[in-house]
Image (spheres, rainbow, N blue to C red):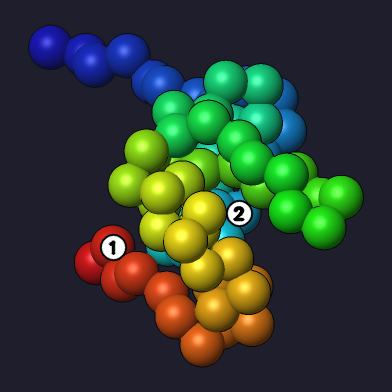
Amino acid sequence: MRLPSFKRRGPTANDPVCHMDVPVNNPPGGSREHDNVTYYFCGPGCNRAFRKEPDAYLSGEKSIDMS
């Protein structure tokens, strides 16, 4: 049996919380503006975490390990 190949289409961005690649056209966790920059999220949890402490995630002080 052959399984279909799932390819990402369109541009992606790096989730600032967990560092996963996220499609910018339809990000599962939505997007958020911070200091005039749009960030995209893999899921609602990363979006909420970023909303609470954006500077900590952007500086690398905090991150979520998804492995």
Tell me the residue at 66%/21% (across/down).
25
Tell me the residue at 51%/68% (across/down).
53
The residue lying toward the viewer, choosing from 44 and 8, is 44
* Residue 6: quadrant of the picture: top left
Using residue 4 as the reference point, say whether residue 57 is left or right of it.
right
Lower sequence index among marks 1 and 2: 2
Amino acid on which disc 1 is placed: Met
Quarter of the figure with the C terminus:
bottom left
Residue designated by label 2: 14
Amino acid on which disc 2 is placed: Asn
Disc 1 from disc 2: Cα separation: 13 Å
Hey, which residue is sitting farthest right in the picture?
36
The residue lying toward the viewer, choosing from 14 and 58, is 58
Q: Quick one: SS at disc 2? A: strand
Q: Quick one: SS at disc 1? A: loop
Vertical comparison of 17 with 61: above or below: above
Image coords of residue 33 (percent x, y): 73, 44
Tell me the residue at 34%/69% (across/down).
64
Hey, which residue is sitting farthest bottom in the picture?
61
Quarter of the figure with the N terminus:
top left
Disc assigned to residue 31: none
Using residue 10 as the reference point, say whether residue 44 is left or right of it.
left
Residue designated by label 1: 66
* Residue 4: quadrant of the picture: top left
Image coords of residue 8 (percent x, y): 55, 27
Confirm whether residue 39 shows in the render: yes
